[in-house]
Image (tube, rainbow, N blue to C red):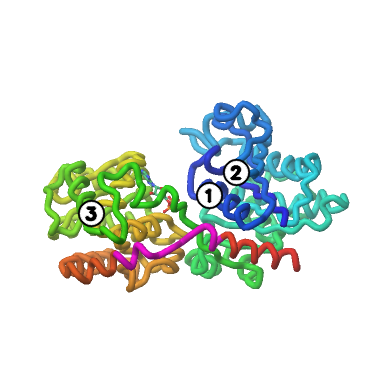
Amino acid sequence: MRIALCASEAVPFAKTGGLADVAGALPLALENLGQDVIIIMPAYKTIQNLTKDISCSIIGKNIKVYFIENDKYFNRDGLYGDKNGDYKDNLDRFSYYCKKTLELLKQINFKADIIHIHDWQAALIPVYLEKLYQKDNFYKDIKTLLTIHNIGYQGLFAKEEFPKLGLDWSLFNMECFEFYGKINLLKAGIVFSDIINTVSPTYSKEIQTKDFGYGLEGVLNKRKGWLFGILNGLDYTIRNPESDKFIAQNYSKENIEDKYKNKENLQKLCKLPVNLGVPLFGIVSRLAEQKGFDILAQGIEEICRRDLQLVILGTGDQKYYNILGDIAKKYPKVISLHLKFDESLAHNIYAGSDIFLMPSKYEPCGLGQMISLRYGTIPLVFKTGGLADTVNSDNGFVFQRYSKEDLIKAIDRAAKAYKSKDKWRKVALQAMGYNFSWEESGKKYIELYEKAKGR
Ligand code: ADP
């Protein structure tokens, strides 16, 4: 099958979040599964610094990556905004990207079976395909799949900007672009794509409810027969305790005891008392309410009074810097706080902690829990989205009511379980055996492409 993957960011060219990981890794899996894949993304400044020929690059064996060029729109430091917020011309920028992407397919004569669209930045593609390009025979049989990585980001713009899209005003209605008086690009993408999916089965159901849908539950509900969920995979070439270059001591299921050398190293790195008997909790996360920092902040003082240690690595909301900063000063032997982005420390936390805390309020897929499992570090999560699909009572600790009290109870359960050394070892070994590979996810995406083709 010929697949054109369209995303506003992809590893290794440009990244602000998980979308880039998916857009960079899924094509590699698809290529290994015998599919013909290309990637089309904007030619940001970072890319101009990366490769000489910015019209096209190659990843994997022969996956061509095409960059849509426009200096005025894309030759900037940020992808979507700067310190003053979102760029004011994001609608111009991404509607341009969508139109040019469709034109590029014809120029390079890539007769795609499927255009695989990601998030709001690319969501105009199915609309343009149907409204502007359908008359051209070249585009006639192309089907579309829209993947939603986080429904919280929809691409909202003022109604007055609608003429910029080059579409008939009649499309600005409640069944299509209109959303509480604004333009909603993701909504139009949902309406016009052949198939839609999110990055975990549970999240695909959750977003059809008021609590999780961010206002799009109604339109998603209408399309529920064509809405699916596929878990993201993990890049096991990077996420592997046997070969991880960042950690103090490599280990595997065969010598899991060596994991404790990483714990000792982490305690030293974090200036915590070196003590293998105390349960060590780790967090690597954006410091945001979505990631559970509201209930964590409410309970942090109680948590710090317990016999445990907690290492937090993250960047995000100032509010949490302040709360956690004060607590870290008060309990220096319990909590070690690192307010930065640090790849090396992140690997050391995954390897050296006993328990990985990820109490997200909502979580489309989540990587942290899958990474920690691979390192034999037991995840503790709230039962939501991708966390509910990957963590259960066999491989982790799950709490079901989103509250400070239930989080603390789960922490107590984990701390108690840690004391039964033999049982803990068994769970850790089992955790290390889980496999969330891109190959499996790739196969599921191919099934969806086939479904779309049959539509
Ligand atoms: P998100 O919603 O932020 O994309 P995920 O769990 O899907 O959450 O992925 C977050 C990724 O970013 C993980 O690989 C995590 O280890 C990494 N990460 C988050 N914060 C930091 C940080 N401060 N330093 C290093 N890595 C981080």
- Residue at 15%, 51% in the rendered image: 334
Separation of marks 3 and 1 at Cα, in angstroms: 34 Å
Which residue range is magenta in the image? Answer: 429-441
Instruction: Write down the residue under mark 3.
Output: 258
Callout 1: CB less than 8 Å from ligand 1:
no
In the picture provided, is 383 more to the left or to the right than 218? left
Residue 107 point in image, percent of width and height: 80, 39
The tag earlier along the polypeptide, 1 or 2, is: 2
Separation of marks 3 and 2 at Cα, in angstroms: 41 Å
**Circles 1 and 2 in contact, beta carbons < 8 Å:** yes
Residue 191 point in image, percent of width and height: 69, 61
User: Mark 1 packing: few (<14 Cα in 10 Å), some, or many (20+)?
Assistant: many
In the picture provided, is 425 more to the left or to the right than 118? left
Q: Main secondary structure of the magenta part?
A: helix
Give the residue type at disc 2.
Answer: Ser
- Residue at 69%, 50% in the rendered image: 4
Is residue 430 in sight in this rendering? yes
- The relative height of residue 375 versus residue 323 in the rendered view (above or below) is below
Mark drawn on residue 19: 1
Is residue 163 in sight in this rendering? no
Give the residue type at disc 3.
Answer: Asp
Residue 168 point in image, percent of width and height: 80, 50
* 437 within the magenta span: yes
Q: Quadrant of residue 101?
A: top right
User: Mark 2 packing: few (<14 Cα in 10 Å), some, or many (20+)?
Assistant: many
- Residue at 77%, 56% in the rendered image: 142
In the picture provided, is 143 more to the left or to the right than 387? right
